Amino acid sequence: MNKKTLVIGASLKPERYSNKAIHRLTKYKHDTVAFGLREGTVENVVIDTELKQYEDLNTVTLYLNPQRQKEYYDYIVSLKPKRVIFNPGTENPELYSILKEHSIDYEVACTLVLLGTNQY
């Protein structure tokens, strides 16, 4: 099942987990969009440097530490995803509460592990 996913904190650097996630998401045939600080393309996915109102998002997967997430709280909520994945190092109880208030599910998990174990 295709779960359209936004990777926030996307990187052009192949050693970064956000980059690996883009590769794996496309390999598993999930529509993938990405937001990061530097423009570029990973696996035919354009990394946007401007916040866009993506439609029909199933998942937002975070690769930003909690301090950096603050400026994106309203943006994430405005996208109305079904869920947000907090990858290792991104855990953020403050954002969990905000998501709960807006009936958005969240998981503290690793996108790469979820994909690799068919639990995505």
Image (spheres, rainbow, N blue to C red):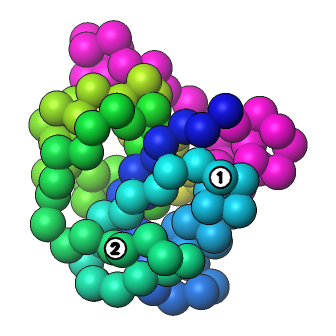
- The percent position of residue 90, horizontal first and vertical second, equals 46, 51
- The percent position of residue 49, horizontal first and vertical second, equals 20, 73
Query: Dot 1 lies on which element?
Result: loop
Seen in the image, is 120 located left or right of residue 6? Answer: right
Q: Residue shown at 36%/74% (left/top)?
A: 46
Q: Residues within 10 Å of mark 2 (few under 14, many from 20)?
A: many
Query: Dot 2 lies on which element?
Result: strand
Compared to residue 26, the image places residue 23 above or below, namely below
Seen in the image, is 15 located left or right of residue 64? Answer: right
Camera sees residue 65: no
Tell how many labels: 2
Seen in the image, is 38 located left or right of residue 85? Answer: left
- The percent position of residue 53, horizontal first and vertical second, equals 17, 45
Q: Which mark is residue 47?
A: 2
Tell me, yes or no, whether the highlighted magenta stretch contains residue 117. Answer: yes
Q: Residue shown at 77%/33% (left/top)?
A: 119
Question: Which residue is labeled 1 in the image?
Answer: 29
Tell me, yes or no, whether the highlighted magenta stretch contains residue 33. Answer: no
Quadrant for residue 109, please give it: top right
Q: Residue shown at 60%/38% (left/top)?
A: 2
Question: Of the residues shown, which amino acid type is indicated by label 1?
Answer: Lys
